[in-house]
Amino acid sequence: MNTLEKAKAARKASFKLASVANDVKTQVILRVAELMKEKQSFILSENGKDLEKAKSENISDVMYKRLVLSESKIDGMIASLLEVAQLPDPVGHVSVRRELDDDLILEKVSVPIGVIGIIFESRPDALVQISSLCLKSGNAAILKGGREAQHSNRALFGIFVDAMAQTDPLFENSLQLVESREDIGELLAMDEYVDLMIPRGSNDLVKYIQSNTRIPVLGHADGICHVFIDKDADPEIAVSVSVDSKCQYPAVCNAMETLLIHRDVAKSILPALAAKMKSNGVELRGDDATCAIIEATVATEEDWKTEYNDLILSVRVVDSLEAAIDHINTYGSHHTDAIVSRDESACRIFLGTVDSSSALVNCSTRFADGFRYGLGAEVGISTNKIHARGPVGLEGLLIYKYRLVGKGNIVADYASGKRRFTHKDVL
């Protein structure tokens, strides 16, 4: 099938998928987990082909790290599948039940969005997260992975196709895979068949998609995350949280890119923190106040605006909590930002005034993740302020409909005063 045919097939499949029973959806996801375990060697072999090609093409270190699969990564994907499978069915949840009159009942009910288009770069594990969440939430999906992960994506997609075919014919065509660069342009023009686009990748990719489609787009362009060490911070926690935020996995969107530290504790905390960062291979770039305390390259204005996705950290000394918040709201990407402090008032102000999809206290920015938040997995992290924000799991793949059930009720009776609305919530 060409891209248009795949989109039409996904649209048709979405109507059937919306009413699939939860135990059947759970069964197919569990079967995917079983097949991934059985076919682990095959997955790693196909991933090896991608890695070999990537080396010959000299892709960036960041992209290469995201491309790599391993036994532990596959185990992590399987764990994610098992968690998604056990989540309650998100479809059919009644959030409002209202009696409009004695025999006229209104309900607001969660339903799948329909067809989700997902364009992602490099990370083949994203295909597993996205596909499992779409199936669990009753959505069809059209997946477009990067050509650098073509063999890995085909292997993982094939496992989903096999699992669906072995479970129930209702899943037929509910997942589609497109591969060429030309497919992206075609997909972005298919607002008749695709209800939501979710990009996962570089700033340039996200901005391109946002600028070239009429389909609503959910996602984030940058992951410029901060840790602020307040004047009342516990020094050990400050170092531990900062190092984890930067070094645990620097190539992802929730890794810290800028460290802010209160002037009152900069001299006492920065030397030990800098030593720990440098022992992990981190290059430090600091403002004048930072460079007067530790050895660092002088930071430029551009550093405060940069998502490095690498072992590079910009450091700035600030005079107050308010100055730190102002810096974050000015230069940040509204993704994930953390404060380290023992002052409950400062933490409360930080949580209330930092304009980010995740605001954290005394813990690593790396916690901002669908799996770690107990969402099972995520289709991405959104910095949008409508529909869904933060790590987007099942809830972000749902919309709602109103259902009204009566017994021959007509508006004329209410317009004339013959009958009156009761408007009584019964849920």
Image: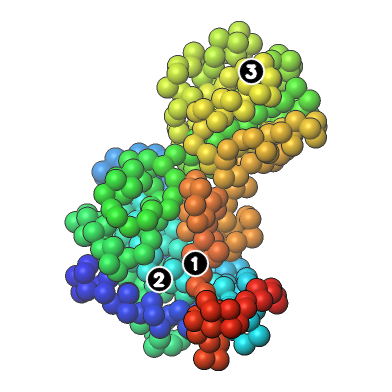
**Residue pointed to by mark 3:** 318
352 w.r.t. 120: above or below: above
Split into 4 quadrants, where in the image is the N terminus? bottom left
Q: Secondary structure at mark 1?
A: strand
Residue 49 appears at what percent x and percent y? 31, 57
Label 3 vs 2, first from the N-terminus: 2
Q: Secondary structure at mark 2?
A: loop
Question: Which of the 4 image quarters holds residue 91?
Answer: bottom right
**Residue pointed to by mark 1:** 399
Name the image colouring. Answer: rainbow
Q: CA distance from mark 3 to mark 1?
A: 42 Å
Q: Residue at x 53, y 41 (%)?
A: 335
Split into 4 quadrants, where in the image is the C terminus? bottom right
Q: Residue at x 79, y 32 (%)?
A: 345
Left/right of residue 184 with respect to residue 396 in the rendered view: left
Q: Amino acid at mark 1?
A: Ile
**Residue pointed to by mark 2:** 114
Label 3 vs 1, first from the N-terminus: 3
Q: Residue at x 61, y 8 (%)?
A: 292
Few, some or many C-alpha atoms within 10 Å of disc 2 (few <14, some 14-19, many ≥20)?
many
Q: Amino acid at mark 2?
A: Gly
Q: Residue at x 62, y 32 (%)?
A: 227
Label 2 vs 1, first from the N-terminus: 2
Q: Amino acid at mark 3?
A: Val
Q: For this rendering, which residue is in front, 330 or 43?
A: 330
Left/right of residue 51 with respect to residue 75 in the rendered view: left
Q: Secondary structure at mark 3?
A: strand
Left/right of residue 402 with respect to residue 67 in the rendered view: right
Which dot marks residue 349? none
